[in-house]
Image (cartoon, coloured by chain):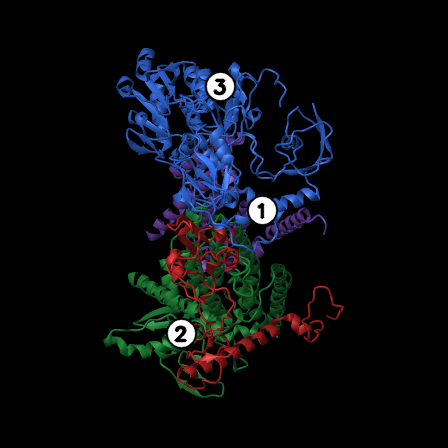
Chain colours: A green, B blue, C purple, D red
Amino acid sequence: MWIDVAIKVGLAMVMMLIVINIAGIHSWVERKQSAVIQDRWGANRAGFTFRAPLLRWLNPVMRPIIYLGLLQPLADLMKLVAKENWSPVGGMKWLHASAPFFYLLFAFVGFSAIPFGDTLHVAGRDISLQVAHLNVGFVFIFAMAGLGVYGIVLSGVSSNNNYAFLGAVRAASQMISYEVTLGATVIGIVMVYGSLDLQEIVRGQGALLWGWLPKWGVFVQPLGCILFFTAALAETKRIPFDLPEGESEIIGYFTEYSGTKFGMFMLADFVETVMVAALTTTLFFGGWQFPYLHASGFVFPWGAQVAVGHYGVVAIQVISFLIKVVLFCWLLMTIRWTLPRFRYDQLMDLGWKRMLPVSLANIAVTGLVILLIEAL
Amino acid sequence: MPKLTIDGREVEVEQGTTLIEAARRLDIHIPHYCYHRGLSIAGNCRMCLVEVEGAPKMMIACHTQAADGMVVHTDNDKCREFRASILEFILVNHPLDCPVCDQAGECKLQDYYMEHGAAGSRLDEDKVKKRAKAKQIGPNIMLDTERCILCSRCVRFTDEITHTHELGITERADHSEITLADGAWLDNRYAGCVVDICPVGALTDRDFRFKCRVWYLTAVDSICTGCGRGCNIAIHVNRDRPHKAGGARVMRYKPRENPEVNQWWMCDEGRYTYKQIDHDRLTEATVEGRTATVEEALDATGAALRKAGDAVGVLVATTATNEELYLARALFAGALGGHAAYLAPPQGEADDLLILADKAPNTRGAQEILGEQAADPVAWVKEKGVKAVVVVGEAELTGLKAEVDHVAVIATHPGKATEQAHVVLPGSVHAEAEGSFTNLAGRVQRIRVAVPPIGGAVETWRLLMELGDRLGHPFDFAFEDDIFAALADQLAPFAGLSHESLGRRGAPLGSGTTQPAEVA
Amino acid sequence: MAEHLFFLYFAVAALICGVAMVSRSNLLHAALWMLAFFVHMAGIFLLLNAEFIAALQVMVYAGAILVLYLFVIMLLDVRELAKVRQRHASATVASLIAGVMGAIMVVVVARGTFNPIHGAATAALLASQGNVESVAIALFTTYLLPFEVASLILLVAMVGAIMLAKRRL
Amino acid sequence: MENVARKPGTVTPAGAPKRGPLSFWERIYVVEAARGVWITTVHFCRNMWRHTLHLVGLAKDKQAAVTVQYPEELRYVPPRSRTRHRIVRREDGSPRCVGCMMCETICPARCIYIVAEEDPDPNIEKRPKRFDIDLGMCVFCGFCVEACPEDAIRMDTQMVDLAAYSRNGMILTLDQLLAGEPAAPREATNALGERVHG
């Protein structure tokens, strides 16, 4: 019993480590990538020069680190932590302080349902590489995402600032609107793989279509994939759907936040980005599946076989999952520096009048196709 | 009664009225420097030249008497041309050092130049420099002879108003200058008035010099609290440049014209009492010597007064306003069934111009409202059997603490009263609250808020109302004028008066019930 | 043992949240207590092996419906409302009824005559069928008519709301 | 400007090709978004490659960033730019300011604080005891320079790099203002500190 608890705790730690690190690196990527994309130089200042004779040899090593701005996240962190813990006059102090906590908490909790590897056999135990094995998988994730709205609403209400309040209203209505599409698009996947359990869905994606094409969600549900990705992007409230915040122009729900509390909002935003990447990977891009990799090793469609040991297989799976997640994070960031922001009516129009009907049609078509295949 | 036409409008004036005064009846302002209604007519600045039809040349409006059938033009082309020429002449030797001149902003030379002159200089010669630029001629007065336009107002003031004859004009032509008489020192008790009447920056007040530019100041009508005369003043407040003069809020007093009280003058003694407004003020309440919030102090006093039942009393200094006196009376003598009396006002020197021996602003008001004077507070307390007493204002109270259970003092400055207090409540001075004073002649005049109560101080009338709340006799006055209305309702001499009807110049006691005579 | 402890926690916490919810005069606080209440209810569902219901409870009630309540509350002036001393005549009657019902419940539980009715969905069935499937089977076979009626009612409500909000379509 | 009839709500920049109605694929937006992502990705890869080469000292002639690399590179500041204030001295070294408070009065940002005092020289009369400019509030409008009757305040130090570690650090005192010197217009320099034209 205690060993089970320890294993679960260990898995949770691994997951946290992965998520927080990817999210933290985001803050660097966001600066440097945006700079390079926009023909700028970007963060290239944070760093230090060693004066002590014994440490001087480190200076040439520091140079590329400074040049690439790798210490910028550290500097950002120091700045955020060192700032005054301030709450607005006339606001509700407790709610104001708890809002970022709510937001970050629910952003993290969702990850417990994401599988980052297949079952690991070690010392006679079967460990499913997933923090919480829930047979309602993504419903749980959506529920947690839904609770994240409270962080936003509370931050808006407790700030005693009409701009923050309006930002919170925009954010909440945007999140609720796109949750509907998000849920509807996933139903296609559920119908294809016949389970709500994310681990089961990933396992289902290990099969091959026509003997050579991995049966990934993106291949069986291409429309669902695009809709899901778009709706999920809207859920993260990042450009081009960043109407709730719009730092420079329209003022958002965390206007009255500074220091660590603001840092928590920012971190939660990045965590949500990672969550979207992880969900997209899990539902549509095979999760931890690597093409043609089976429990015993590679079996290629042209007949060649490469045997890989169990630990090797698990390692390849976990790394494959991580690489996919990072690639999607990268794509999300690139989209941020590519597309302009939607207008609010366009956003609502897109969500309710275009994406929702299309996703409903997608369900109907998927059902028909499945019936047809079964009938044949 | 001559009837004349000024700028096309007819006006009928008394025999002997000058044109400048006749024009004033029609709200026509004729520019002038040397003319002052409180002084004799000199007629030397020539700024008030007007055209009188039929007269061979321009006439000075300040000295030409109105005659029947006169047709006067004050603002035609000829007048304007003459004014511009006079200004050019006056400015010939003026140093034009407005940047360093304290008069800048309230200088008639600047005003009229912008209005009537505004011409480029045609002067080829060097300006005639006077002997010294800035020179001290009295304890409070600086003289800059270069800026002087020799209107002689200050000379006439010392000759005619104070009869001290310190000043005179010496030398000839463009070397003429204002000079002190041999061995004299401009230190009479009204010396500050020469600064007020100087139309340019020749005479400046050493106390005000360089502290603040006059355009930063806001003027608030008020009453001088130096003595029982009740001179009308304007409190000049610096509201939005707090870095000036070490953070002082009130910059100066200026006398305000009121023919019934102080004409145009005020004494130096009163003029510099403004320093008391911010100096060494009580800014927080104390209970038994410990710092407390005003709420706590009020609670303590309220509890003590409650305990004393009707053995309570209030002693109000004659610096309190009519409103504060009325609240004290209504609460202690009225609602609580206790006793109320006023403290003897401090006495000092008097003279035959303005200064009175009674050095409190509202002795008459206290007489009218409370009636009873407690010449010796300790004896009064003993006689009345008072067990808990509230003192409003400053007083000599030695030994009071031993006689009663509780002494609460509503004071503005630490002094002999606060030494005897169990509870000290920080109250407001006259510049921090609305209200009214009744001067010794029985004239009720308003004071207005110039600055908010300093630090943690609270308006005295508000403190009295809070006490009323705690004693179960809440007053429902929202503002000071409500209190005055109640006062006017209850006390016959004040009947019919209100803050509104007092206006800028006040009204005598009893005038509210009689039809006012012809207002001139 | 652990299950009992968890149940005790969820039950007591849900009760406390419920009482707090109805007793707060600040609507915003009441809504947040309601949120806590929903989460604890979901916890009880989890203990009953009803994971799907638990997730739906959080997603639908807490994630959507309560957020809409919050919208309304936010658009009202919460501070102003909190100042109003709300005292209705019906409050006395309501608390009386609640008190009587509470007393009945206490008596029933104390006498030990309160036996849970075992439904069709046993833990074994859930393990073999899966959570969602069990719900779906119940919903689309046994209770099909009530389900369809409920959806019709919802449709009517939706149309009514749109008609009320948008007079000119 | 020629008067071109336009559809209401559309603004066509001069010289831009006229755009027709969006095609179906453009309205679908996904393809267009993908094209956009492609463009940014190309920019990223090209610039990142060049940055990497620069780091090891190669391909210095190919620009990876088009922006001025302040503070290694500086932009040209025209001589008449309004830059940090200074107070001019008289020949004897005392400040030319007479504390008339004209600049304080005209200042729209209210960033000037003057306290005047008596000057021992009766021909000057007045001098500033305190003359502070809060650069944190200054809007560099130059009204103070225009208003000064003594030509005592000027904005010709050519100092534009104004920063401090605290708000109080942004307040210049009389001594600091007197220490300012007029400077030649700042030349544009490249990363190596070499003078650049343009």
Residue B89's label in the rendered image is 1
Amino acid type indicated by mark 3:
Ala
Label 2: state its secondary structure: helix
Residue under mark 1: which chain is it in?
A: B
Amino acid type indicated by mark 1:
Phe
In the image, residue B408 lies at what x, y percent?
34, 24
Label 1 neighbour load within 10 Å: few <14, some 14-19, many 20+: few
Distance CA(mark 1)–CA(mark 3): 47 Å
Q: Is residue B292 above or below residue B76?
A: above
Pointer 1 and pointer 3 on the same chain: yes
Residue D157's label in the rendered image is none
Q: Which residue is mark 2?
A: A318
Please name whichever residue, B219 or A244, is drawn nearer the observer in this view of the structure. Answer: B219
Q: Which residue is mark 3?
A: B441
Residue A46: quadrant of the picture? bottom left
Distance CA(mark 2)–CA(mark 3): 100 Å
Q: Is residue D51 above or below residue C78?
A: below
User: Which comes sooner in the sequence, label 1 or label 3?
Assistant: 1
In the image, residue B13 lies at what x, y percent?
67, 26
Identity of the residue drawn at 70% across and 64% down: D9
Label 1: state its secondary structure: helix
In the image, residue A226 lies at what x, y percent?
57, 70
Distance CA(mark 1)–CA(mark 2): 99 Å
Label 3: state its secondary structure: loop
In the image, residue C167 lies at what x, y percent?
71, 48
Amino acid type indicated by mark 2:
Val
Please name whichever residue, B291 or B94, is drawn nearer the observer in this view of the structure. Answer: B94
Please name whichever residue, A118 or B281, is drawn nearer the observer in this view of the structure. Answer: B281
Residue under mark 3: which chain is it in?
A: B
Q: Is residue C84 visible?
A: no
Residue under mark 2: which chain is it in?
A: A
